[in-house]
Image (tube, helix red, strand yellow):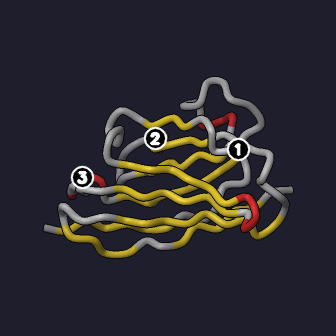
């Protein structure tokens, strides 16, 4: 059973960058797509980015496309999210999870192994 742990959150100034990590504390994720999500206060959890098992295919949500990079290191059983030019409205808890296939990537119920999340606060 896969279980994930997110890290790297904290306080970021508007216009700055974040670098998050998603490590498997149980199970192997090297053959599974990994997704990053975020949930702002009072809002639905939304997909940020998804990467397939090899890293050869990536999907980005519209709000972050062009300023985000999702990557992975299967030898370390870890995935990463890097985002630039953050805005205050991107303050949220950022989560990672895995899935079994590469379809309907924005459907949350297709993911499992959710971590506790890491808080990212973007300030002026």
Q: Nearer the viewer, residue 113 or 64?
A: 64
- Cα separation, mark 1 vs mark 2, equals 23 Å
Residue at image mark 1 = 54
Earlier-in-chain disc, 1 versus 3: 1
Front-lying residue, 69 or 38: 69
- Among all residues in the image, which is located at the extreme front? 56
Picture layout, residue 123 above or below residue 70: below
For label 3, the residue is 89
Label 3 crowd bin: few (<14), some (14–19), many (20+), radius 10 Å: few
The residue under the point 67% across, 66% down is 23
Q: Looking at the rendering, which quadrant does residue 101 occupy?
A: top right
Residues at discs 1 and 3 in contact (Cβ within 8 Å): no
Residue 50 position, x and y percent, is 56, 41
- Please identify, in this view, whether the residue under mark 1 or under mark 3 is nearer the observer: 1
- On the image, the x and y values in percent for residue 81 come to 48, 57
Question: Does dot 3 land on a helix, a strand or a loop?
Answer: helix
Mark closer to the observer (1, 2): 1
Report crowding for label 1: few under 14, some 14 to 19, many 20 or more residues within 10 A (C-alpha).
some
**Where, quadrant-wise, is the N terminus in this rendering?**
bottom right
Q: Which residue occupies 77% across, 36% down?
A: 100
In the rendered view, would you say 58 is above or below 83? above
* Total numbered labels placed on residues in the image: 3
Quadrant position of the C terminus in the picture: bottom left
């Amino acid at each position: 059973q896969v279980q994930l742990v997110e890290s790297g959150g904290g306080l970021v100034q508007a216009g700055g960058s974040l670098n998050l990590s998603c490590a498997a504390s149980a199970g192997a994720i090297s053959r599974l797509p990994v997704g990053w999500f975020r949930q702002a206060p009072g809002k639905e959890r939304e997909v940020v980015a998804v990467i397939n098992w090899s890293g050869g295919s990536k999907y980005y949500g519209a709000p972050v496309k062009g300023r985000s990079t999702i990557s992975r290191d299967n030898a370390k059983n870890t995935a990463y999210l890097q985002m630039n030019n953050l805005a205050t409205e991107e303050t949220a808890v950022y989560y990672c999870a895995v899935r079994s296939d590469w379809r309907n990537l924005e459907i949350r119920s297709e993911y499992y192994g959710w971590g506790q999340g890491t808080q990212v606060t973007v300030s002026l």
